[in-house]
Amino acid sequence: MKKGIAEVPGVKCGTAFAGIKKTEKPINRPDVLVIVTDEPSEFAAVFTRNDVKAAPIKVSMEITGKVSGIVANSGNANACTGERGLADAVEMSKLASQLTGKGKFLVASTGVIGEPMPMERVRKGIAEAVKNLGKAKREEPARAIMTTDTFPKTAFTKGNGYVIGGIAKGAGMIDPSMATMLSFVATDVKISKELLQRALREAVEVSFNAITVDGDMSTNDCVFLLSTGRNSVEITENNYREFRENLTVVLKDLAYQIVKDGEGATKVARVVVEKAKSKEQAKAVARKIALSPLVKTAIFGCDPNWGRIAAAAGAAMVGVEEEKMEIYIGSFLLFKGRRVDYNEEEVFRYMKENDEITIKVVLNQGEEKFEYLTCDLTYDYVRINAEYRT
Amino acid sequence: MKKGIAEVPGVKCGTAFAGIKKTEKPINRPDVLVIVTDEPSEFAAVFTRNDVKAAPIKVSMEITGKVSGIVANSGNANACTGERGLADAVEMSKLASQLTGKGKFLVASTGVIGEPMPMERVRKGIAEAVKNLGKAKREEPARAIMTTDTFPKTAFTKGNGYVIGGIAKGAGMIDPSMATMLSFVATDVKISKELLQRALREAVEVSFNAITVDGDMSTNDCVFLLSTGRNSVEITENNYREFRENLTVVLKDLAYQIVKDGEGATKVARVVVEKAKSKEQAKAVARKIALSPLVKTAIFGCDPNWGRIAAAAGAAMVGVEEEKMEIYIGSFLLFKGRRVDYNEEEVFRYMKENDEITIKVVLNQGEEKFEYLTCDLTYDYVRINAEYRT
């Protein structure tokens, strides 16, 4: 079992099964998670940019100063639930404070949109999770926030005298509009709120914002980062870069796991765009390719269909020059201003035999680079999402 | 058999089978189309905005003045084919001029990207199609430009003393990046080039640009509109509006057929956004909903999942206000600031029993409206596109 947020000094986690989602099949995992820090912690947060924000997002956005932890649930997103939903989210946050005897709590939810929260069950679940504080370790906290996820997602790394550990959920990620991903991360460094927020923003940009989740986030997406300050290491401008790099390692690890668990996915594809004239151009091209259903179905079919990749690159409408462009799948060059000779069978075999494949587009217009993660589009994606609710 | 472009006075069509696409299964339809007008015609054109433009697009974009017709083929897109592709497209255009003894020809291609045009066969095909001029009527010209289309697409209408007829191809339209749609339309009015171009631009905006094809067009997309002037009716500012409305009827008819033939589609969905604060807001929201894979799979599953519709509306990030929003499927109100009571079984039945369903989102922020057409996302979409080439 991999380390996660519970292995960060100063952090304790408790989970409970409250039966929040009415379902015929009982689930064998918890659906309420309470995370507390021994002392109030600085925190940083990134929220969905969707105009339709879930109640817990609205409530958490209003929280300032330090927090004592996070209360979260799966099975119900508490989104599009009006005034009552807001009151429920506030109550969840307050209940966690009261029952732990601590300060403010961030709140997050994931699951079905539009159903009222079954608050009686939620209250019991929070009470039980608080009683269990300290018991949920390694992958257990991540299990409490799973929905269509098929495995819990945790990541952990050591910096120079400190650690960073986190968990995440997310699987509906093939669709960029409504991924409903959550991620909770903690570290034991001392750091100012400003620097913590900057590190989170910069690390999210190349991790969660570089998988096909984010262009338009869900009603519930959020990433919370707590610093317990339990370690004597202090992050300042001097050692900021190292801290941000370590944070990026953890977030990229979690982001990779979300793509790997993409609904119905059988393969992860790294879309690398190089020698772009700007970061923005590189990202726009990478994103367009990563989002293309035609490219994604070609990956599923192990079809080295570079024509679809070229067309998607051009469709980004950021000044791609066809004559200069090179397209690789794995190490195979398929296009260089025009089709080049390659062994189709060989490329097919590379795509067939690997769970992770690389699509590289070299624009030869500058020196900038960006990498996006995506997965294939399969029959199972359609099955999962055509059957999800009814 | 429905009327199309060949039924416009002054227009003659000829087709031929040239065997342009190498395939194991012989196709029982032509793959070369030549359209000529008795006298040189004014024309208007709308082209793909993709940075990667196919050779015929580049060649047609350079054509000015009047034209004598259009030469087109299916089976090969002549895209990403470098200098040779350009030379081939120019040759196709010139060959049509020479063999008909007429003026300039627009050129268009559709099919696989990146393969060189088999020019020997193409030349023979054009020669034969020219010999057959006048023989291809009704749906026959449309059959020559089909690729994954399952039926030929034609439309025809009568205005006040004139007619407008057209054909189109397109089926990979579920994916907005690379639809590869073509449409050729003719009318017998007299009209200035400026007014013709304006009518085409305005009519395309609410037809082909209001289906999930166009946000990012393919390498080959184009719409050509010819006016033969064979009729004595002249279009001026006075009767412009009526002409544009009739043109819109024809283009909307063709656009509807493209959606109906969407790869793997079983249902057409009209996404209507009303009471928006601006046309742009209405269109952005309608488009986001129409593109959402989660909404499209829910339509396939006949799941009245208004939560996904709400989330997609918010993901457009154009200031949708959740409290004011209403969501309808068919005539059933499902959401009004929050979930309302409705009979889920009844809505399911409506979605199940109809080939065309309506999703209506009322924003209650103004008076503007926009309508988008989309289709469901099915297993067959994945099958068709995972198997397309290999």
Image: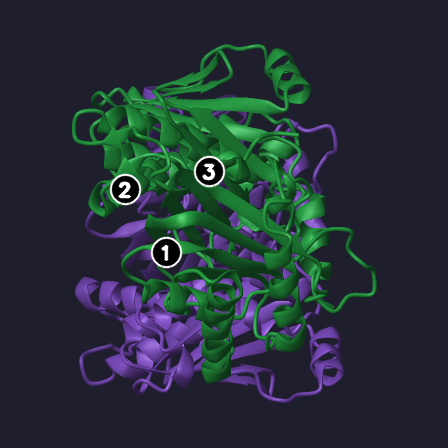
Chain colours: A green, B purple
Q: Which residue is mark 3?
A: A290
* Disc 3 packing (10 Å; few <14; some 14–19; many ≥20): many
Q: Residue at x 39, y 57 (%)?
A: A48
Amino acid type at image mark 3:
Ala
- Cα–Cα gap, marks 3 and 2: 30 Å
- Cα–Cα gap, marks 3 and 1: 37 Å
Q: Nearer the viewer, residue B96 or B316?
A: B316
Q: Regarding mark 1 in the picture, which secondary structure is present there?
A: strand
Residue B315 in view in this figure: yes
Q: Is residue B83 left or right of residue A25?
A: left
Q: Answer with mark 3 or mark 2, whichever residue precedes in sequence.
A: 2
* Disc 1 packing (10 Å; few <14; some 14–19; many ≥20): many
Q: Which residue is mark 1?
A: A67
Q: Which residue is mark 2?
A: A196
Q: Nearer the viewer, residue A291 or A188?
A: A188
Q: Quadrant of residue B329?
A: bottom right
Marks 3, 1 in one chain: yes
Q: Regarding mark 2 in the picture, which secondary structure is present there?
A: helix
- Depth check, mark 3 against mark 1: the one in front is 1
